[in-house]
Image (cartoon, rainbow, N blue to C red):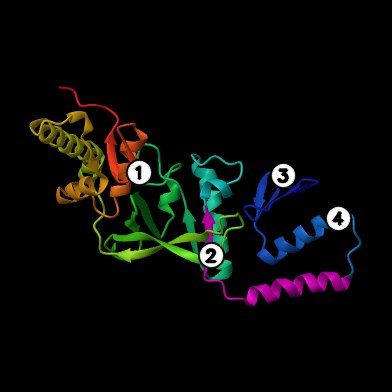
């Protein structure tokens, strides 16, 4: 919003004259904005008083937390890599914090190379009182401190996604319950890279078990003088066999099974699971 040589940056709560930032009180900034928005309208004294009183009423409300989600979306046209422009942005955050006597929570993406710090100018991290990173693996999120200005860094904690029903159904014909998710504290360990590797090999191991079960079934039919091509394996039996090998925990079995189906390795019809590719001899 501009007029004459004045520019109002509503995203940063900043007034600039001739391109230079001018320090003004929040109430003054709001009144200038109000006047600018009504530049072609005759404003009565009563209207101006009402505007001031509304701001005063709002000021009396208790604000404890302001969330900026994300820094990039609220940064405007500035350059995150510029120490000067990042400094200007952080000064705006200080103005919000000091004016409302509240905590300002900034949500920022990590750097492309260094996942332990926010991207852009290093001056961002330098002005923070506390800095945490969030890392997700499967349904577990780890909250890990990277900086604590005036206290000892706490231990990392793990949070787990938990589905909740919102108490109403969708508008489509299925009338399915509408759900969301919350994070709850958990004592479960955060999955490591080794865990991820093990997870990736589960479909292959489950497929090997199914191959072995078919081979055994064919062998039994052949020994009994019957056609080995009539071999069948029940889905339930395969599932139990995978469970015994630790491949079918409640949270991961669907992912393992669906991986094999989507990659054309198996198909499930009725009570039976079929191999779509014959193992090489």
Location of residue 199 by image quarter? top left
| Cα–Cα span, label 4 and label 1 | 47 Å
Which residue in the rendered view is the most extreme toward the right? 42
Location of residue 39 by image quarter? bottom right
**Is there a contact, CB below 8 Å, between mark 4 and mark 1?**
no
| Cα–Cα span, label 3 and label 1 | 39 Å
Disc sitting over residue 39 in the figure: 4
Q: Which residue is disc 2 drawn over?
A: 97
Residue mark closest to the camera, 3 vs 1: 1
| Cα–Cα span, label 1 and label 2 | 27 Å
Residue mark closest to the camera, 1 vs 2: 1
Q: Which residue is disc 1 drawn over?
A: 115
Structural crowding at the residue carrying mark 1, measured as other residues with C-alpha within 10 Å and reported as few (<14), some (14–19) or many (≥20): few
Magenta range is 45-69
In the rendered image, residue 93, in percent from the top left (x then y), is placed at: 54, 58
- Asked which secondary structure carries label 1, the reply is loop
In the rendered image, residue 141, in percent from the top left (x then y), is placed at: 34, 55
How many callouts does the rendering have? 4
Sequence order check, earlier mark of 1 and 2 = 2
Sequence order check, earlier mark of 3 and 1 = 3
129 in the magenta segment: no
Residue mark closest to the camera, 4 vs 1: 1
Sequence order check, earlier mark of 2 and 3 = 3
56 in the magenta segment: yes
Sequence order check, earlier mark of 4 and 1 = 4
Disc sitting over residue 156 in the figure: none
116 or 159, nearer to the observer: 159
**Is there a contact, CB below 8 Å, between mark 2 and mark 3?**
no
- Asked which secondary structure carries label 2, the reply is helix
Q: Which residue is disc 3 drawn over?
A: 18
Structural crowding at the residue carrying mark 2, measured as other residues with C-alpha within 10 Å and reported as few (<14), some (14–19) or many (≥20): some
């Amino acid at each position: 919003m501009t007029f004459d040589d004045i520019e109002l940056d509503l995203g940063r709560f900043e007034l600039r004259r001739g391109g230079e930032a001018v320090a003004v009180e929040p109430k003054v900034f709001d009144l200038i904005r109000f006047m600018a928005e009504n530049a072609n309208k005759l404003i009565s004294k009563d209207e101006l008083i009402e505007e001031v009183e509304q701001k005063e009423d709002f000021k009396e409300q208790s604000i404890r937390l302001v969330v900026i989600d994300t820094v990039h979306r609220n940064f405007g046209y500035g350059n995150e890599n510029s120490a000067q422009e990042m400094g200007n942005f952080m000064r705006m955050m200080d103005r919000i914090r000091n004016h409302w006597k509240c905590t300002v929570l900034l949500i920022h993406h990590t750097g492309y190379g260094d996942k332990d710090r926010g991207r852009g100018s290093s001056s961002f991290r330098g002005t923070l009182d506390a800095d945490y990173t969030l890392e997700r693996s499967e349904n577990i999120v780890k909250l890990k401190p990277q900086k604590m200005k005036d206290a000892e860094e706490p231990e990392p904690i793990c949070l787990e996604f938990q589905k909740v029903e919102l108490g109403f159904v969708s508008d489509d014909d299925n009338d399915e319950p509408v759900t969301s998710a919350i994070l709850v504290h958990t004592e479960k360990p955060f999955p490591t890279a080794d865990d991820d590797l093990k997870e990736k090999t589960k479909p292959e191991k489950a497929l090997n078990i199914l191959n072995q079960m078919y081979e055994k079934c064919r062998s039994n039919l052949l020994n009994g003088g019957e056609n080995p091509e009539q071999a069948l394996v029940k889905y339930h039996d395969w599932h139990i066999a995978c469970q015994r090998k630790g491949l079918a925990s409640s949270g991961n079995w669907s992912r393992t099974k669906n991986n094999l189906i989507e990659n054309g390795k198996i198909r499930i019809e009725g009570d039976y699971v079929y191999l779509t590719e014959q193992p090489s001899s």
